[in-house]
Image (tube, rainbow, N blue to C red):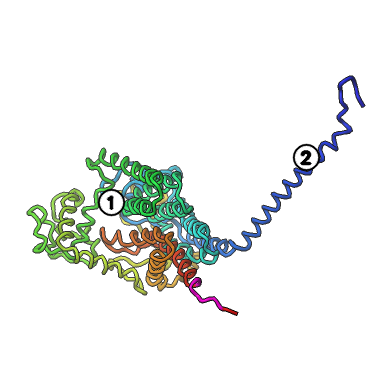
Amino acid sequence: MPTSSGDIETGPAAPADRAPHDERQAVRHDGRRAVRHALIRALRTAHTPFAVVLALAAALRGLVMLGYDTAQLYWYDSFTYLDTAVHLKPAGAFHPAGYSAFLRLLWPFHSVELVAGVQHVMGLGMGLMIYLVLRRNALPAWGATSATLPVLFDPAFARLEHAVLSDTQVTFLIVAALTVLLWRARLSVRGAAAAGLLLALAGLTRTAAVPLLGLVLLHLVLRRAGWRPVVALALAGLLPLAAYAGWYRHHHDRFALSGSDGVALWARTMTFADCSVIKPPAEEARLCPNGTVVDAASEYVWAPGASLNRLPGDRFSHNELARSFALRAIAAQPLDYVREIARDASLAFAPTPVRHPLRVSPALSFPQGSWDLPAFPLIDKVRTEYDPGIRGLSSVEPYGSLLAAYRYPGVLHGPLFGALLLLGGLGAIGRRRTALLPWAAGVFLFLGPIAALDFDHRYVLPAVPAACIAAALGTTALWRTLRARRPTRVP
């Protein structure tokens, strides 16, 4: 009832006023519930196979963490990375500091086991990105899931994830860059900048990835992606590299990312160089083959009798001279250079993985046993500064026996890798232009290290995810093309 002139008694009318509001709330609630149920149904149907695969891959990595009492440490790469993480500055020889910067982020925890754990998560992340980008490009769930299997279940990937080495990080960054580049048909400026930064970080992790930036820029230009994405990718990629090179120059008086490119290329030429053909000047002639023979090009870097290692001073102090000799040798004997690259590349496709060099065994399984660390001052230094628990690796029972029983057929390494490259290439030159970029990236990541130094089974692994993406896209394109060409039956 009215209480005074102009006042309105709102109590009795309130339920009627609230009714439309309650109905709207109920509709919104029902809508959210319907969306939630739809998502659950989608997850239970389309994505269930991949969810199972990812769970199994996570279980495998959990078993690896339980099956070994610490992370795998290699002399001398692992300890160089860890030492650089503590004393952050660009190393003068092989390794840029990108991986050491990652290790520095984890330094407060003083645990190489944590490093391995984070890298196992990166391995799972690579599988997830491959799946998502393929689904985004209209592949069926089974096809996208199949493309993740080599990355998620090959022991070589799981073992490298468990090691203090840069391989997992550089591969993760490359897969992330490809995911961004392939996510949309038309690359945005923001996406281009993100991809450029990821490629720069990959190059600062391992210099073999640096030319990928140029490869992607060329791809964007040829596809007429527009000048804004091209400029954004170039700036986001080149500025970090230039900044690092300036930092390197501050410490080593040379505008570069590392100080070993010339030494590596010189070692590559030692498998074919003929100085009677090259005719080098007197100073470079000291680097001619001197009769020392080893079983792989990379071994010349370390062979005490090799001509470079007989010069006074540290081998890397002759990097400029070695590069000059190597370029002269390649210019004088280009066919011999290509032949050596082809010969070493063929090792990747062998049904039974080849030991190259002979002192190295391919990582086809999970070993059992104990492996002590050598006695070097650098190891003691890193143990004191980074992780007091650093020690040799030992397998732990009963998990070690379970890992040893795990079988991943060796034939899936060489022949499967060849099939992935072939299918990706056929798709790239056919009707699926999207396959061209990951296929070209995979081929470059495979051949680049061989051309720059030597073949190594480790160096093949960064090419595998890109090859898987390209093969999945290419196979889908070929299948759809064949189906479209089938004659239509007339009833």
Residue positioned 89% across, 19% down in the render: 5
User: Label 1: which residue?
Assistant: 94
Q: Position of residue 23 (x, y in %)?
A: 78, 44
Q: Disc 2 vs disc 1: which is toward the camera?
A: 2
Q: Which numbered disc covers residue 354?
A: none
Which amino acid type is marked by label 2?
A: His
Nearest the viewer among 305 and 409 is 409
Q: Which residue is mark 2?
A: 21
Does the segment drawn in magenta span residue 50? no
Residue extending furthest top? 5
Name of the residue lying farthest toward the right: 1
Instruction: Give, as a three-letter code, the residue at label 1.
Output: Phe
In space, the residues marked 2 and 1 are separated at their CA atoms by 68 Å
- Quarter placement of the N terminus: top right
| Residue 356 sits in quarter | bottom left
Q: Position of residue 51 (x, y in %)?
A: 57, 61
In-front residue for pair 467/301:
467
Q: Which residues are magenta?
A: 483-489
Is residue 116 in view?
no
Q: Residue at x 28, y 42 (%)?
A: 248
Q: Is residue 319 left or right of residue 403?
A: left
Q: Secondary structure at mark 1?
A: loop
Q: Earlier in the sequence, mark 2 or mark 1?
A: 2
Residue 373 showing in the rendered view: yes
Element on which disc 2 rests:
helix
**Which of the 4 quarters of the picture holds residue 104?**
top left
